[in-house]
Image (cartoon, grey):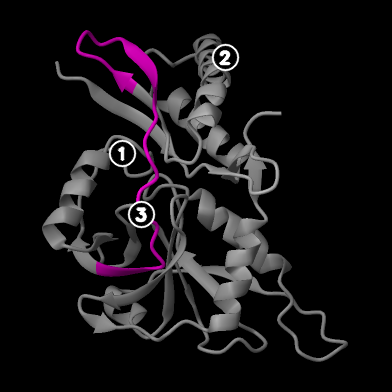
Amino acid sequence: MDAQLLAADSFRVRLNPQTGAAEVRGWARHRSRFTRAVREAAPGAAGRENEGRILDRANAFIDDALPRIAAYGAGFPRLELWNDASGTPALRLSLRPLPELRDTVELRTAGAVRLAHPGRKGPSIARLSELNRELGAEALLLDSDGRVLEGATTSLVWWTDDTDESGCTVAAPSGTAPNRVASVTEALLRDAAQKRPVGRMPNDRRSGSFSESGPTAAELTSHEVWAVNALHGIRTVTSINGVALPSPVPQRLAWFREALDRTWEAIEG
């Protein structure tokens, strides 16, 4: 049996400009997502006692990995759970250089791609990477009804209004696991949206909101759309299937990028 990647979690590491400490946006969320995935995916994980041992092992592995991640510096490391050729689960750390960071991305629909574990990051990485290469763009994954789920490497959010005035609502596809991966960056944006004041009048205390919906790819082209992930943060989507999308509202985009910048967390105390 060939080795299989059962679970993974990747994130951008930066060195704090003032302190030099290694930091990750929403680090606690990444750690939690990976340990949940390991508990779900590890062979022989059934049963409370086995789950406890697996979680202890995963947390010990992460604790041991942190000094290596910090010493590597700015990069794009990945925590991994493998099922090796003998069927034995193995936790591994992949230290990788930081890829080129981009502010924009093009999407192209890939249809209802069937994935073995669509709600878990890891098992489909190789297939989705190949799909991106074939399409020459970020693959836009749809459900069986043609509704938008996510990008191959990103979560998608969009705005229901083309202005930055009162009442703007940011939306995302309905649901997460088992249909799509629970995005850390999307969760950070949800938190920010709910705290952001949108009223312009002095006594207007309204804040932004976050909703869920299921548009088709064609319906999405009339909105400002962001592709968000742990590597790039927010990339604005310039086109879907060659159709140009509305330009982003500059002030709103700047506000949310700054909000994401406030979520950098040191990965070791």
Q: Earlier in the sequence, mark 1 or mark 2?
A: 2
Q: Is residue 29 left or right of residue 101?
A: right
Task: Give the residue type at disc 2.
Answer: Asp
Q: Is residue 51 above or below residue 124?
A: above
| Residue topped by disc 1 | 117
Q: Is residue 269 above or below residue 173?
A: above
**Depth order, front residue of 32/244:** 244
Q: Is residue 190 above or below residue 125?
A: below
Residue 16: give its label. Answer: none
Residue 24, quarter of picture: top right
Q: Is residue 182 left or right of residue 163?
A: left
Crowding at dot 3, Cα within 10 Å, few <14 / some 14-19 / many 20+, comes out as few
Residue 100: give its label. Answer: 3
Crowding at dot 1, Cα within 10 Å, few <14 / some 14-19 / many 20+, comes out as some
Residue 49 location (% of width, % of height): 55, 9
Residue 131 location (% of width, % of height): 17, 52
Instruction: Residue at 64%, 68% (x, y): give it.
Output: 193
